[in-house]
Image (spheres, rainbow, N blue to C red):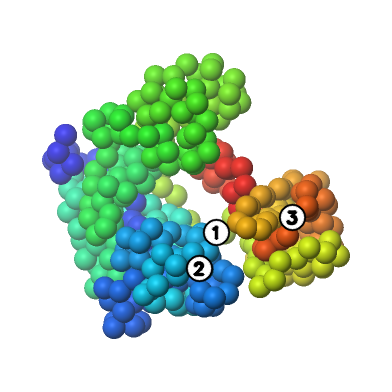
Amino acid sequence: MDSRAAASPADWVLHVDLDQFIAAVEVARRPELRGLPVIVGGAGDPTKRAVVATASYEAREFGIKSGMPLRVAARRCPEAVFLPSDPPAYEEVSARVMATLRDFPAVVELMGWDEAFMGVHTDAPEAMAADIRQAVTAETGLSCSVGIGDNKLRAKLATGFAKPAGVYRLTKDNWVAVMAGRPTGALWGIGPKTSRKLSEMGLATVGDLAAADPAELAGRFGPTMGPWFRVLAHGYGDTEVVGTPYVARSRSRETTFQEDLTDRAAIDAQIRTLAERVAADVAAEGRPAVRVAVKVRFKPFFTQTRSVTLQAPTSDVRDIERVALAVLDRFELDRPVRLLGVRAEFGHADRAAAERVPEPGEP
């Protein structure tokens, strides 16, 4: 099916995703960097421990990707321009983008700094998508891609085909033609580790997963998530776009140490400090935490995350600190520690978050 084929007036879901958002904001502030490999992360110093927050498309051609240590990125692309992360600047630009989207006759559901779903009723979704792209560029100078779908899942995946700076439609009509031969990891909600487990079952593609036995999936991944993976493979998803402001699902703090920690007392002290900062963030948010997670990155670069659900929601620093230390006890601290993190999760996660299987070791 032609992704621009005509349609009768109908309800559509558009997924608007800003292209290389953080890097684009930095380049907009420094036009002389346009066309250069730009890497943003930490304090912008690749000699210090930190990871890549984002990389421009030019940097990605060298294999640079988010989460990569800055030192590794510097080795792969010595000529890259490294910049420190500046969250307030990104928040300000994001607010302008979202205000621009709300000028359209649509319901806008924010998903983060750089993406949002829009619920629209139109007979020309591609034309509206083009207008949205033009308006965002006119207001901010930034480029965005727009995925068009008959539900959120398909709209989100369509954006991947639209990037960069394009528009693409993915619906039930072209789902099989576009997606059936792609690896299961191409689905929104299936990470690399789950994809590998599916491959071990002989389910390498989306088409394979769509035809899989739900009972076998339930036996491998549990009665809820196993069959849900098959649902994803058919492209089914939520069609409702909720016009509510973006609400953070968690607050977290983490620290990368310039020298590895090996002393348990020092590790405990750092966890207490991080827990105090997170508790302050939770109090400022005005919503109690229902779950506390601890992230540990061991030398050289092996990351694990453990978490527990609280007996009762809390914003109390003592409770969050106590639980964080208890979670820390679940780790085997038998190797040098290069990073620690503490995360407090709130109680109102959306459906997509609830249905998604976190990857082991994922923050």
Q: Is residue 92 left or right of residue 357?
A: left
Q: Is residue 32 above or below residue 286?
A: below
Mark 1 or 2: in front is: 2
The residue lying at 44 percent from left, 76 percent from top is 82
Secondary structure at badge 2 equals helix
The numbered mark at residue 247 is 1
Tag 3: amino acid: Arg
Secondary structure at badge 3 equals loop
Place of residue 333 in the rendered image (x, y in percent of width and height, measured from the top left): 78, 53
Question: Quick one: label 3 or label 2, which is nearer the N terminus?
Answer: 2
Residue 151 shows in this picture: yes
Place of residue 300 in the rendered image (x, y in percent of width and height, measured from the top left): 63, 58
Q: CA distance from mark 1 to mark 2?
A: 30 Å
Which residue is at the front of the view, 354 or 325?
A: 325
Tag 1: amino acid: Val
Disc 1 residue crowd, few under 14, some 14–19, many 20+, Cα 10 Å: some
Which residue is at the front of the view, 31 or 239?
A: 31
Residue 28 shows in this picture: no
Which residue is at the front of the view, 357 or 256?
A: 256
The residue lying at 43 percent from left, 54 percent from top is 109
Label 2, on which residue?
A: 70
Disc 3 residue crowd, few under 14, some 14–19, many 20+, Cα 10 Å: few
Secondary structure at badge 1 equals loop
Label 3, on which residue?
A: 335
Place of residue 66 in the rendered image (x, y in percent of width and height, measured from the top left): 46, 60
